[in-house]
Amino acid sequence: MHIKLTSLIFLFLFYAPIHVFGHGAVQRASELKDSEVRLFVADNMDGSVVVVDFPDGEITHRVSTSPSIMILASNKDNKYIYAMRGRDTDNDLTSILSTGFDMKEQQFRKPHVIRTIKTDTPGGPRDSKMATVGGYDAILTEGEAEVVVIMSDDIDGYSELKTKRYKIAEPDHYHYLEGETYLYIGHLFNGFVQVLDRSTGEEVKRINGCPRLHGMTEDEESGRLIFSCARDVIVVGTLGEEKAKLIARIPYPENTGRGCAAFLKGEGRVQWCYTEGIIPRLYRVDFAQEPYQFTTLSVESSIQQNSSDDGKYLMVLSKQGVLYLYHGRDGNLIKTIQVSEPFLGDWFEDVGKAILPDIESHNGIAYISLTHEGRIAEIDLEQGKIKRYIDIGGFPTRIVLLAKETLVDATN
């Protein structure tokens, strides 16, 4: 009897299906991709971040984040992408994504959401880059009037997120830059620049007389900061004897209507300023020449503008879907490229979510999100022609571009 029972057990074990003993082993497949450029594109149809890798132009991943993305920005060392939602609900969230770049392998993996945090009216990024305080990522919470500094070089889903907080004077819409030792915070509605000591958090001073402050930039060579006001632009020093002092005011050209909303860096120390709304002009200023003064460049009514990463081109996308390429120093027209159908109707962007197209570029190639067509245009700026379209679907808006060569250089 014992022998028969043993035989039956043996036969059962021999012929039993493999799942009786647990899951079988599989061969692990590598997710590494040797891409040259990776785009992160905010799709405001569903709130996802679409990842497109080049040169293949392949959509490699869709990362689900909170709906109504308003801001998409990378941190200082391009390890993380911050997706900040707009203000169309009473629950403001910021999702922190990995970029997927494997520093050891120097290739890309699929990105993912590391964590999502509650933030009260988040802001602070400029030119698709996160604000910083002492080299750490910072979020300006406009509802709570605080600068929240994330005091971690590495962010994961397990560890406590250590923060340091600076109190801002009042809730407002802020335009922020960090100086050598001070933090400079422009207040839109209150019309002043608040200066905080980075080491203590104490207020050093306020620079008044800048009503409707909206838009700012930096002249890196002089360290001077430029804030746009309703009637003119103020220049504030950050170095040496100029620190936290009003250096100059630059009046807008006469009879031009509205002031600056944002700045684009051209060739050399030339910067271009575009006015808010669909207005057919840009302003030019060369910070290598004092006294500073604006000149005007007439353009077609435009829906988006940017400069190329090397400052060689000033790129202006018109409402008619034409990309105008101007010289980044003198503003001379170089060529025009038809990239899309016209942008019909009203394209006024409020604080609910991003709706406008975006333009980014690298090494002579531009990428434009065509929100009304649900696709990305890849454009060879040197040859002045469309290379291809990548169908994203949905409603693609904000773009963050990461180039492998830049990431590799940063790790060496």
Image (cartoon, helix red, strand yellow):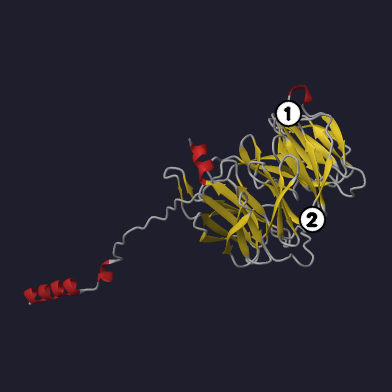
Q: Is residue 238 left or right of residue 158?
A: right
Residue 288 at what x, y percent from top left?
76, 30
Do the numbered discs 1 and 2 sit on residues whose CB atoms are within 8 Å? Answer: no
Q: Is residue 10 above or below residue 201?
A: below
Mark 1 → mark 2, Cα distance in angstroms: 33 Å
* Crowd class of label 2 (few under 14; some 14 to 19; many from 20; radius 10 Å): some
For image coordinates 51% across by 45% down, the residue present is 404
* Crowd class of label 1 (few under 14; some 14 to 19; many from 20; radius 10 Å): few
The total of numbered circles placed on residues is: 2
Q: Quadrant of residue 221?
A: top right
For image coordinates 89% across by 48% down, the residue present is 256
Q: Which residue is mark 2?
A: 300
Q: Is residue 160 above or below residue 357?
A: above
Residue 196 at what x, y percent from top left?
75, 34
Nearer the N terminus, badge 1 or badge 2? 1
Q: Which residue is mark 1?
A: 222
Regarding residue 72, the answer to whether it shows in the image is no
Q: Amino acid at mark 1?
A: Ser
Frontmost of labels 1 and 2 is 2
Q: Is residue 224 left or right of residue 35?
A: right
Q: Is residue 266 left or right of residue 232?
A: left
Residue 148 at what x, y percent from top left?
67, 43
Question: Which of 91/37 is in front?
Answer: 37
Q: Secondary structure at mark 2?
A: loop
Question: Which of 136/314 is in front?
Answer: 314
Residue 210 at what x, y percent from top left?
87, 40
